[in-house]
Image (spheres, helix red, strand yellow):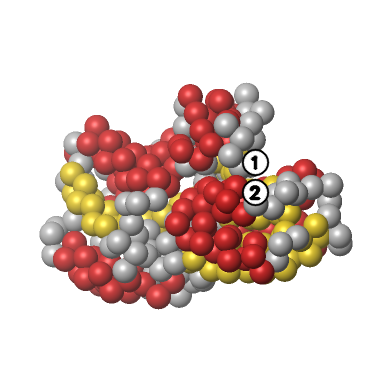
Amino acid sequence: MKLKKLMLMCAFTTSVISMGSTVSAAEIKKIGLAVPNLSANYFIQIKESVEEYATKKGIKVLTVNANDDSSTQVSQVQDLMTQNIDAFLYIPAGAAAATVPPRLARRAGIPVVNLDRNAETEPGDTFIAGEGIKSAYKVCSHIIDLAGGKGEMIIIHGQKGVTPEVNRTKGCEQAIAENPEVKLVANQWSERWSQDEGFSIAQNLLQAYPNVNLIFGQADGLAMGASKAVAASGLKHRIFVGGYDGDTGALLAIKKGVFDVTATQSTRAMGRLAVDSAIKLAAGGTVPKEQIIDAVLTTSANVDAFIADHP
């Protein structure tokens, strides 16, 4: 039922944005899409959704992949601006790169749809993302409850300073603050939100803090890497691991009991919403400054629905 409710909400949001627009998709010929990397399942799902949905509307998508390099992304966006795109969909490769591409697009008169990450000083014309604070709060509260409300925790962060890292930190810290018998003993930041980083960071921190029984990886890749480190650590006590995003591989891992909980984001709905927003903005219409979609707490109890039909 939760999945159906979420899908209805996403469909409703998309339809509201499209209402009143006098432009047809046929008048939009080309959209530029800049992504940080295509090694993360989260970004792959957004890319595929944008391309599939735009193609159905007869729109060409030019996709560039920065491979997590900010300077590469800025160069790629400069090139996109010369290719007669009608709108620009943008996921910054890092906090340092977040402001330049929207500025370039505005100078060229091209509307900007930011996905997942935004910049306060140069925000997109609209910002589409999964809600991060209360969802991270729920993930951390869940693993704390599993641990009986006490223990030592480590947080393996995403890329420092980007929107999801900031919000997920706030949410988890709220959960910790409500549980005085939980001590946050270490924070460490990753560069790529990757499984390899999750493994190496968790491995080092478990050696330094062998009493840790709670790990929050701010992306599923980090959580899955941390789970592998737990298995390899030889520690005898139970360590509860939470992730974030609802990556397809992570959902299967939760079903198998590899780690305990994630927050499933509506990545494919975000991609469709971005295309609809771009169409309206390119026609001179308006859309909300922020379009935030809730993530859904996902455990072994409800994971099958998301494996069968990822939102």
Residue 85, by quadrant, is bottom left
* Figure quadrant of the N terminus: top right
State whether residue 288 appears in this view: no
- In the displayed structure, does residue 148 sit left or right of residue 268? right
Cα distance, mark 1 to mark 2?
Answer: 6 Å
The residue at which mark 2 appears reads as 241
State whether residue 259 appears in this view: yes
* Mark 1 vs 2, N-terminal side: 2
Q: Amino acid at mark 1?
A: Asp
Give the residue at the far right of this rendering.
180
Assess disc 2: are there few (<14), some (14-19) or many (≥20) residues with their C-alpha within 10 Å of its C-alpha: many
Residue closest to the eye, 66 or 255: 255
Label 2: which secondary element: strand
- In the displayed structure, does residue 104 sit left or right of residue 266? left
Residue 169, by quadrant, is bottom right
Relative image position of residue 289 (x, y in whole percent): 48, 57
Q: Residue at x 79, y 47 (%)?
A: 147
Q: Residue at x 51, y 70 (%)?
A: 160
Q: Residue at x 20, y 51 (%)?
A: 62
The residue at which mark 1 appears reads as 260
Residue 182, by quadrant, is bottom right
